[in-house]
Amino acid sequence: MEEIPGLLNPVWAVFRKGGITDDLAIIGQVADILLTIQGKSGFSSQSSTLKTEIDRSRITDLLRQAVEQNNGDAGDLFDRTILFRLDQMLPGGRYPTPQHVVQFMAAIADADGRRAADFACGSGGLLIHSEGSQQIGAFV
């Protein structure tokens, strides 16, 4: 089986070929797909506003393989591999929330089994770690 970086490089290439060059935008799209892979719904992404078509099925297949390589843990894959595709803080001080903060927030949000909502979700880390089946978020 192919290593995780070897699976993620083509994911980035497909997005770039489709005209998406902002790494945080790619990470947000990847978060949306990972939620779908986990059977979660309700995540509001920018996918409906893409200027060009991307091969979402190819990306989904690659991400499924990466999740399998990571022992089926999409949240850990997101935290330990995908977020580190950002090599610097982005303009406006944008940077993903640290993993321990996301896990704490997800634990609080899921304490009573309700839906999780993050209306300034950035890359979607809180929603990926949320245990509920419905997540609501919006990229800002």
Image (cartoon, rainbow, N blue to C red):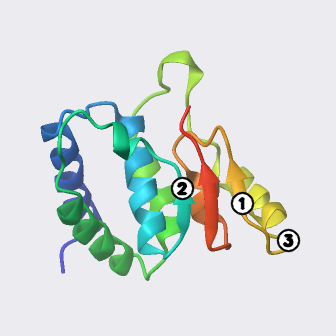
Front-most of residues 39 and 75 = 39
Q: Compare residues 94 and 25 and report the one nearer the observer.
A: 25
Please tell me which of labels 2 and 1 falls first in the chain: 2
Task: Locate residue 48 relative to residue 112 in the image: left or right.
Answer: left
Residue shown at the point (22%, 54%) measured from the top left = 11
- Lateral position of residue 47 relative to residue 35, left or right: left
Pointer 3 residue: 111
- Left or right, 8 with reference to 99: left
- Residue 25 falls in which quadrant of the image? top left
Q: Earlier in the sequence, mark 3 or mark 1?
A: 3
Which mark sits nearer the N-terminus, 2 or 3?
2
Are there few (<14), some (14-19), or many (20+) residues within 10 Å of tag 3?
few
Q: Is residue 30 visible?
A: yes
Q: Position of residue 22 (x, y in %)?
A: 33, 30
Between the C-alphas of marks 3 and 1, the distance is 10 Å
Query: What is the number of callouts on the image?
Result: 3
User: Image point 52% across, 66% down: which residue?
Assistant: 76
Residue furthest front as drawn: 48
Say which mark, if any, is on residue 32.
none
**Amino acid at pointer 3:** Ala
Q: Which mark is residue 116?
A: 1
The residue that appears at 62% across and 74% down in the rendered structure is 133
Query: Residue, x 48% and y 65% (percent of image)?
Result: 35
| Mark 2 element type | strand
Provide the secondary structure element on which disc 1 rests: strand
Q: For this rendering, which residue is in front, 57 or 84?
A: 57
Q: Which residue is mark 2?
A: 43
Q: Is residue 132 above or below residue 52?
A: below
Amino acid carrying label 1: it is Ala
Q: CA distance from mark 2 to mark 1?
A: 10 Å
